[in-house]
Image: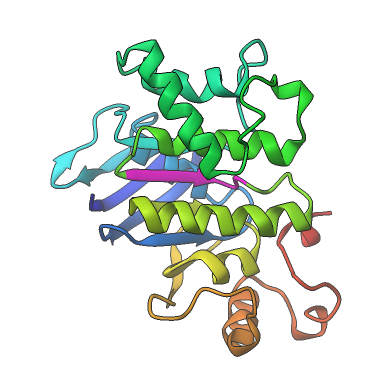
Amino acid sequence: MKLKFNHVAKRFGDLHVIDDFSHEFAQGQLVALVGPSGCGKSTLLHIAAGLADPSSGSVLADGRPIVGPHPGRTLMFQENALYPWLTLVQNVALALEFQKIEKKRAREQAVIWLEKVALNGFEDYYPHQVSGGMRQRAALARAFISKPNVLLLDEPFGALDALTRLTLQDVLRDLISESGPTVLLVTHDVDEALFLADHILIFSPRPAAVLKEFNLAHRKKTHDLSDFAAMRREILGLLGIHAEQLEQSKPFTLEKIRA
């Protein structure tokens, strides 16, 4: 599904969050949105999900205006948002039950998707009985089970440790490769954006405006980013990170400079 933002602006009272944003996201692309905290990236996802209206401008999904939520557009947050009173398989199956799919069939599909994210054997565990990484795997399965045309990811791995984050980036990449949705990924992790994205949009401080777009569509997806050192340095420079800071922490995330 193609997403097209036409001169979108968003204000909350006197707070001007997004300023005249226009961009077209092609079918099957993964585009990372990177920028300072509070610059409006998550607001763009909420508008694309139909959970918020732009103050001006419009958003089109395959040429049709977005006027509210739709099962074809799935939004996933940093918090896994699993229901604690439901098992993992019940949480995943719920996405299909909301679409009026019979409960037995929904469970069968949920079992298949939990296996895809390496949670076979944990179907009947409750969220509090498994690790944060496992909960986020279940959240990924729930996001993909309804086969959305558009997947909106708001820092989905931001709360995880580095090793778990790398593992789940591989899982996400494989799921996207299999199902082919259009993906908008908000992240503060520059290396995550370089690894996962076909394109990276760098945003200015609020109100959000695109400073530059980077194209990585034809490169091999690997965690070895040595060939992209110059691009990484340029991205960090656009974000206000000086060269002498680059060696202080690898991988480098914007979370480091907010501490």
| Overall secondary structure of the magenta section | strand
Q: Is residue 36 visible?
A: yes
Residue drawn at 46 percent across, 36 percent down? 143
Horizontal side, residue 150 vs residue 237: left or right: left
Task: Give the camera-side residue of 225 and 255.
Answer: 225
Q: For the view shown, which residue lies furthest in the left direction?
A: 63
Instruction: Pinpoint residue 240: horizontal percent, then vertical percent.
Output: 67, 73
Q: Quadrant of residue 23?
A: bottom left
Instruction: Pinpoint residue 178: horizontal percent, then vertical percent.
Output: 38, 54
Task: Give the camera-side residue of 246 and 19.
Answer: 246
Instruction: Pinpoint residue 74: horizontal percent, then vertical percent.
Output: 40, 36
Q: Is residue 182 visible?
A: no
Residue drawn at 70 percent across, 19 percent down? 126
153 in magenta: yes
Horizontal side, residue 251 vs residue 54: left or right: right
Question: Compared to 145, does 214 lie above or below?
Answer: below
Question: Compared to 10, does 124 lie above or below?
Answer: above
Image quadrant in which the C terminus is located: bottom right
Magenta span: 150-156
Question: Compared to 185, does 134 lie above or below?
Answer: above
Instruction: Pinpoint residue 76: horizontal percent, then vertical percent.
Output: 51, 37
Task: Give the camera-side residue of 51 and 99.
Answer: 99
169 in magenta: no
How was the colour assigned to the protein in this rendering? rainbow
Horizontal side, residue 193 vs residue 163: left or right: left
Residue drawn at 16 percent across, 47 percent down? 62
